[in-house]
Image: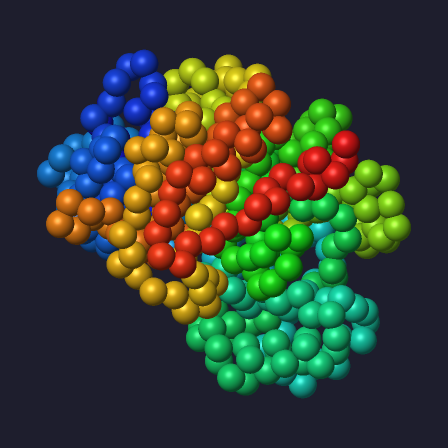
Amino acid sequence: MKILVVGSGGREHAIAWRLAQDKEGHELYCAPGNAGTAAVATNVAIAADDIEGIAAWATVNHPDLVVVGPEAPLVKGLVDALQGIGVTAFGPVAAGARMEGSKRFAKEVMDAAGVPTGKAEVFTDAAAAKAALLSFGLPVVIKADGLAAGKGVIVAETTADAEAAIDDMLVGNKFGAAGAEVLIEEFLHGEECSILALVDGENAVLLPSSQDHKRVFDGDKGPNTGGMGAYSPAPVVTADKLPEIKEKIILPVVRELKKRGITYRGVLYAGLMVNDANSNPHGPLAKSGSTVNVVEFNARFGDPETEAVLPRLGGSFATALLHAATGRLKDEDVVVKDEAAATVIVASGGYPGSYEKGKAITGLSEAAETGAIVFHCGTKTADGNILTSGGRVLSVTGMGATLREAVDKAYAGVGKIAFDKMFYRKDIAHRAFDRG
């Protein structure tokens, strides 16, 4: 198949890389791609959120499938535009992408579908929002309604912090239109994990479980990031929980969206909080009373979860995506290898705050020789050199018969890589190992 992957991060490199593993052999393109995707696909100089540019390219080049990576073009209606010119696209239409683009909308859908989640209230007035804090207790979660580049969620440990977050969003306009509405949410206790499900509008097939590491430093310290690493499978998601997740969380959302006239096709990513005797023996259950609650939904593959999950998939990845995009998804479309995977993010000094770009990267070939898979997150090529161009620079994935082997292989690869002021967490998968 001729396939265009839209995006420029580690997620998109992982998608293109996994498509390149298919035995059928595909003609792959990435828009705009990065220095890593250039090794497995032809990069096309069109920004991921340039809806008209991508549609124009598709009109001329007639791809069999377009796979949309990031959330922004989904929310802006890229899939709608492609469908309008007769091009098959993997990803939800803009109305479905509101599951990520509007946290208020997602809560409304969850409540209507009976999906277990924490209680929440929506506010546009700062004084009213502050007055409601008492009923939520501490800690409490303050969320901007719209897309805020992963920075619109504040877990406040004190009332002062919660009030400051409310003021930032509703008074200071910190996130612009994305923060015009604010959700105050119940804090969910337990252990977080991610479930990515392929959805074809009616049916869903769960991909292997994963868990990412959002805090920037070892021991889950420091500010939240886009993700500093991930691993799959996540032991917190025991086999008995998978049917519950599919039947009580994923499918009810798909059906509720269908009731609203939205045929959801693509990835439905459930960020979950598991609260049981192993994950959190002392914390209270959410108001829902369920041991598995939804923290949030995303409308696309997660990053860095994708870099840990996709290497575990066998079979034809393109067929699975095509069947989801065209309403023909079957359980057998998803083949899972009996291996574990772990991903370590290599980042620029200063991330998630300000950082320098343009640092020369060495050791990429040596890292690959260890058996690790190196995905590019924020890189560019200049004068034959590969340089840093983002806060998260590389995503190094190891595979193994056990999670310990996978983690060790990932770190062996990381150990070969160098650039000025690079850093990474050294405790990826610590929660899994702490379980014993």
Front residue of this view, candidates 407 and 318: 407
> Most extreme residue toward the right, as rendered?
282
State the image coordinates of residue 353 (x, y, percent, origin top left). Answer: 46, 68
Front residue of this view, candidates 221 and 423: 423
Q: How is this picture coloured?
A: rainbow
Q: Which part of the image, by quadrant, shows the C terminus?
A: top right
Q: Residue at x 63, y 39 (%)?
A: 429
* Above/below status of 324 relative to 297: above
Q: In screen coordinates, is 298 left or right of 285?
A: left
Q: In screen coordinates, is 68 left or right of 424?
A: left
Q: In screen coordinates, is 21 left or right of 227?
A: left
Q: Which part of the image, by quadrant, shows the N terminus?
A: top left
State the image coordinates of residue 116 (x, y, percent, origin top left). Answer: 73, 46
* Above/below status of 162 relative to 4: below
Q: Quadrant of residue 145?
A: bottom right
Q: In screen coordinates, is 137 left or right of 211?
A: right
Q: Quadrant of residue 319?
A: top left
* Above/below status of 327 relative to 294: above
- The answer to whether residue 178 shows anywhere in this view is yes
Q: Residue at x 25, y 30 (%)?
A: 40
Front residue of this view, candidates 31 and 371: 371
State the image coordinates of residue 334 (x, y, percent, origin top left). Answer: 49, 20
Q: Residue at x 67, y 46 (%)?
A: 192
Picture mark count? 0
- The answer to whether residue 327 shows anywhere in this view is no
State the image coordinates of residue 376 (x, y, percent, origin top left). Answer: 34, 43
* Above/below status of 122 relative to 333: below
